[in-house]
Every structure is written in structure tokens, then in C-alpha cells.
Image: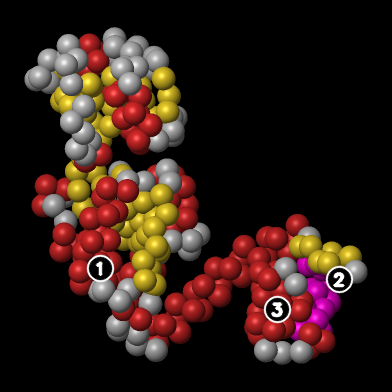
């Protein structure tokens, strides 16, 4: 397969335009068009639908783009590795996280040790963050209960546990409240797919307890506001409780509601300078109890 032709296809598909792709590759548009046409003709396929000046990827072209995105991402990594880039401050790092709190701990460590490093953070569900990591949309992830997989490098980072939150003056006991009693209260919980919801629902099912939330809310902040408004008892991770004079936290007894958080990267990318820096910081800041 001709590498120049494949790169030409990739750039046109990424830019959505022959003109922009030619400008990015610093070649003439006729040259670029000839390379893409040669690729199509050599395999007897059509990768683009051409409608005047507009183009659209064919289904085959979409499948090929998914492959070339990985090919050229790996090529860039190979160049970076062979060039011997050792100064993380010269680059950028994208962190995906399903817990803003634990991600901020990692970010603070990176800023302290690598102040010139450009950082960006995206927050999502554990499943979406792991997908982004494997699709090269983020470089490092802070994840709860990451799967043991051969393609992942995992550094245990923190342990966290679920707690109930109630308004100050609520009748709940100061000491641990049994899970069975907690589930009898009007419960305010995160949406299906959230780690908070999954952990609590799994614990209830294991004990054959009825899990019937009175309200589902899509953010931690909204759960806190609903509790403060007297709408029910909330459940959050202890690290997310923060400081709020109008709320208090109550430990939950009768179930193991702890979650292991880890900093994760792809095994194949861990030697890249910026990723290596993040993983080293994670190891330095790791709580020994997290292992």
C-alpha cells in the first residue's frame, strides 16, 4: 500500500475538503486528487462520493478513516519517541476522568512538577472515558474500578466510598446507617450508568434489598442542591462531599461501598514523555491504601 496515497486520503477525509487537505499537506490540489484517485483505482473501490465541490465519505471510506486515524496517531508517537522528547513542558496532555475530584489531585501534581505542560480535562462516565482512552481522544484517564486488561497500564491512585448526605438537623443518626434503612428513605441518586448508581444498586441487589430511588439527577451538584432543598437523602462519594454548612454526611453500614480509583494509560503509549510524566506523578501521589 502506498503510504503517500493513504496519507492523502486520511487528510482529505479528516478535513472534509480537497482544498484544505492540500493546504495542510503543502501540495497542489491536482496532486492530492491524483493520489486519492490512484488509491481508489489500485483497489477498485470508491472512498468518496463527489458531488460538485462537495465530498462525502462512502461507508468503506468511513471504515478506512477509523483505521488511518490510529495509523497516523501511532506514527506521530513513533516520531516523538525516536526524537527523544524528554521535556514534558514542551507538550500537551489530555486527561479523561469520571471523577473531577481525583483528576484535580493529579492535575495539581502535574502543575507543580511540570508547570509548562499544557493540560486539558474531559469528564464523562467510566465507560466513555475508557473508550476515549482506547480511541486516542485522551492520553491518560482517572477511572474507577478500571478493568484488568493487557492493553492498559494501571497505577492504583485512591480509594473512595459512598456516603449519604442529609440536611443539618435531619433525623438520621450521626453514626453509620444500615443500607437497608437508607433505602427506605426518599433517595436522590445519580442516573443509570454512573459509578455512584452502579455501586449502590449492586450492593442492594446482593442483599436482595428493594432499590427504588425517588429521584434521579444527572450531576453531583444537582444531588447536593436537591438534598439541601429537603427533597430526600442523597448518595455521593465521600471525596465529593466538600464543605457545606447546610449538609452533613452519614456513613453507610452493611455493605462494602468502596471504589478503587486508578490512573490509566495505554500500555503501548506509556513511554511517551508526557504520558510517562503523568504516570510518574500518579505513582508519587498514590495513596498506599489504594493498592
Residue 250 seen from this side: yes
Measure the C-alpha gap from mark 2 to mark 1. 46 Å
Q: Is residue 25 left or right of residue 241?
A: right
Image location of residue 3, percent across then percent down: 65, 83
Give the mark toward the camera: 3 or 1.
1
**Residue 175 in which image quadrant:** top left
Kindly identify which residue carries mark 2: 53
- Please state which of residues 39 and 239 is positioned toward the viewer in this rendering: 239
Identity of the residue drawn at 16% across and 16% down: 169
Identity of the residue drawn at 21% across and 53% down: 157
Give the mark toward the camera: 2 or 1.
1
Q: Main secondary structure of the magenta part?
A: helix
Magenta segment includes 210 = no
Identity of the residue drawn at 69% across and 84% down: 23
Disc on the earlier residue, 3 or 1: 3
Residue 199 seen from this side: no
Q: Are marks 2 and 1 in contact (CB under 8 Å)?
A: no
Q: Which residues are magenta?
A: 32-48
Measure the C-alpha gap from mark 3 to mark 1. 36 Å
Q: Any mark on residue 111, and which?
A: 1
Callout 1 secondary element: helix
Label 2 environment density (alpha carbons within 10 Å; few <14, some 14–19, many ≥20): few
Disc on the earlier residue, 2 or 1: 2
Measure the C-alpha gap from mark 3 to mark 2. 14 Å
Image location of residue 288, percent across then percent down: 11, 52
Check the image and report above or below for 242 versus 51: above
Kindly identify which residue carries mark 3: 21
Callout 2 secondary element: loop
**Residue 266 in which image quadrant:** bottom left
Image location of residue 210, percent across then percent down: 35, 12
Amino acid at each position: 500500500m502506498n503510504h503517500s496515497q493513504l496519507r492523502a486520503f486520511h487528510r482529505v477525509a479528516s478535513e472534509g475538503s480537497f482544498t484544505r487537505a492540500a493546504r495542510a499537506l503543502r501540495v497542489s490540489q491536482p496532486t492530492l486528487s491524483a493520489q486519492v484517485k490512484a488509491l481508489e483505482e489500485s483497489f477498485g473501490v470508491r472512498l468518496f462520493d463527489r458531488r460538485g465541490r462537495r465530498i462525502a465519505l462512502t461507508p468503506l471510506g468511513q471504515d478506512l478513516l477509523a483505521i488511518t486515524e490510529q495509523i497516523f496517531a501511532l506514527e506521530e508517537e513513533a516520531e516523538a519517541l525516536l526524537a527523544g522528547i524528554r521535556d514534558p513542558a514542551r507538550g500537551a496532555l489530555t486527561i479523561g476522568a469520571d471523577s473531577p475530584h481525583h483528576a484535580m489531585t493529579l492535575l495539581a501534581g502535574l502543575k507543580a512538577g511540570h508547570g509548562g505542560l499544557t493540560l486539558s480535562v474531559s469528564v464523562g462516565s467510566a465507560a466513555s472515558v475508557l473508550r476515549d482512552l482506547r480511541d486516542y481522544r485522551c492520553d491518560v484517564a482517572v477511572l474507577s474500578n478500571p478493568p484488568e486488561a493487557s492493553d492498559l497500564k494501571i497505577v492504583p491512585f485512591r480509594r473512595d466510598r459512598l456516603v449519604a448526605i442529609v440536611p443539618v438537623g435531619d433525623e438520621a443518626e450521626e453514626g453509620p446507617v444500615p443500607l437497608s434503612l437508607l433505602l427506605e428513605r426518599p433517595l436522590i441518586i445519580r442516573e443509570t450508568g454512573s459509578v455512584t448508581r452502579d455501586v449502590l444498586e449492586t450492593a442492594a441487589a446482593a442483599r436482595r434489598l428493594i432499590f427504588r430511588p425517588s429521584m434521579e439527577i444527572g450531576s453531583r451538584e444537582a444531588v447536593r442542591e436537591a438534598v439541601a432543598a429537603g427533597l430526600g437523602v442523597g448518595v455521593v462519594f465521600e471525596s465529593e462531599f466538600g464543605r457545606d454548612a447546610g449538609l452533613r454526611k452519614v456513613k453507610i453500614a452493611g455493605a462494602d461501598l468502596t471504589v478503587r480509583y486508578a490512573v490509566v494509560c495505554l500500555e503501548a503509549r506509556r513511554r511517551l514523555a508526557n504520558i510517562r510524566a503523568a504516570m510518574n506523578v500518579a505513582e508519587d501521589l498514590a495513596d498506599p491504601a489504594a493498592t
